[in-house]
Image (tube, rainbow, N blue to C red):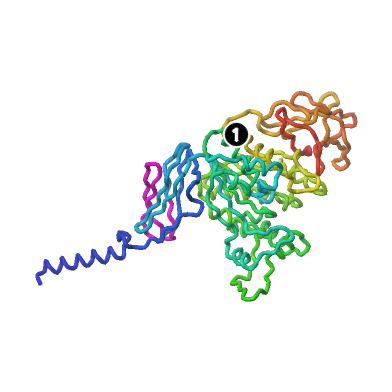
Amino acid sequence: MKKQSIVLVFALLTFFVSCNNGVENSNAKSDLKVARIFGSSMVLQRNTEIPVYGTANSGSKIQVEFNGDKVDVETKTDGKWKAKLPVQKAGGPYQLTISASDTVVKYTDILVGEVWLASGQSNMHLDMSRTLNGKENAKKADNTNIRIMYFQPTFPTGANGVHTDEEIVKINNNKYFNYKGWNKVDSVSVKNFSAVAYYFAEKLQKNLNVPIGIIHNAVPGAPIESWLNKKIIDGDKLIKEYGDKRWSDTTDVMVNIGKNQVKIKKSAGFKLDSTANSHSWMPAYNYTNGIEPIKDFGIAGVIWYQGESNAEDFDFYPHMFTKLVDSWRKDFNDDFPFYYVQLTSRNDRPTWPDFRNMQRVTLNSISNSGMVVISDVGDKNDTHAKNKKPVGERLATLALGKDYNIGDNYESPMFDKVSEASNNLIIHFKGKFKDLKTSDGKSVSGFEVSENGVDYKNVSAKIKGNTIVIKNNKKSKYIRYAWKSYTEANLVSGSGLPVSTFVSE
């Protein structure tokens, strides 16, 4: 054989071998997977680059197509890939296509608009069918411009429920949430969806006239530490000790309920590989199952309703809450707004005034945050007050004012300072509100004064413009307002938003 022929044969063999082992080979297996948060009928975030991501074999070439744009990326050595689509305006429906050498994934009926994450515990989770007028409002729901993603928990989480063997296996294998995919809002899809999240989305959509997407992953009973990143918990001695001590506390009613729910039953043939007996109230559990799988997805912001399970730890809660907000913003690569709900009113909850006041004060230490006050829609005997429409709509009013410049009277008045003039105490408030009034047209109620900060007595108060005037003949130094677990204090803004619980600093 001539030398030139030998060289040619060698070159051809080298070519075929490289094609069989390299990514150029159209027959190479990519094992392409797209993150589960993506799906048909979803909403993608407008006015920002849109991340699309997933996993595939290392070196696989992935192409993402959307609304005429194409982006090519290559899977990294860790098996992850991420493409960033160009900024999109509100609109649709569109198709999203993700292609590898051997796989094509297509999602249809996709809109571009505003996407919000709704999270927390039971009062955020409480569905339309169990709330005031919720069944009737669900029957009227029919808006294809609102799309919902429900991360349904593996029940039960109530005091009387015990998980089945199969549920225990799911929980221990970090498959706690049952993904239902994205759905258009109608009477069926919204019936078992978060009432707060739905009313929030409904008001946003009506005022913005763009598609709205809501991701809902709240868990009844879940304490804040369950929503924290494990790395943060392990790296913070105080939080680590707090979580470990709490879950090992045999006197903690909530913990005992959780332990009972995941108690291994010796059913015939039942096997459990893990001995962890995981539960959704454990530190980091809901983060691992509910936040980590969706991080990086484009969102406009977060609405948060949680605190009942941490109300006795109002002094320590701000430390954990600040960590949570900071870490979630890093996870989603955005300093998005974080709006939360102040605890409402209920009898026999002695720490709730302190907790509500702590939530108010925490506003000063978390940037781009806001809080809605709902003390007027509580229930004397039920932590899960059923009137949820004002809660969702007040969150929407806050977001519309702060983020979308719609409205100028969108915040509850918050205590600012006290000044003195002519034997009077003048209480000043801050926030985007106009005027003060009483919710029932009667005299102002709910104010107390003290000389020593311990012994308080009721005092009459009068509205003067945007301030409150209190006679101070005895030179009282301390003032507090709505300082009862179930408060009937009646001071509101001109638009009817309640004044927050406070004690003068």
Say which quarter of the image contains residue 359.
Answer: top right
- Name above or below for residue 237 compared with residue 271: above
Say which quarter of the image contains residue 270.
Answer: bottom right
Q: Amino acid at mark 1?
A: Leu
Query: Which residue position holds label 1?
Result: 400
**Which quarter of the image is occupied by the C terminus?**
top right
- 71 part of magenta stretch: yes
User: Residue placed at 79% from the left, 33% from the top?
Assistant: 490
Q: Nearer the viewer, residue 34 or 352?
A: 34
Residue 360 location in percent, x, y? 71, 40
Q: Secondary structure at mark 1?
A: helix
Q: Nearer the viewer, residue 375 or 350?
A: 375
Badge 1 crowding class, 10 Å Cα cut-off, few under 14, some 14 to 19, many 20 or more, is some
Q: Nearer the viewer, residue 143 or 365?
A: 143
Residues shaded magenta: 58-82
In the image, taking residue 1 as reference, residue 505 lies left or right, namely right
Res 325 seen here: yes
Residue 418 location in percent, x, y? 78, 31
Residue 500 location in percent, x, y? 74, 37
Residue 249 location in percent, x, y? 75, 63
Q: Nearer the viewer, residue 328 or 178?
A: 178
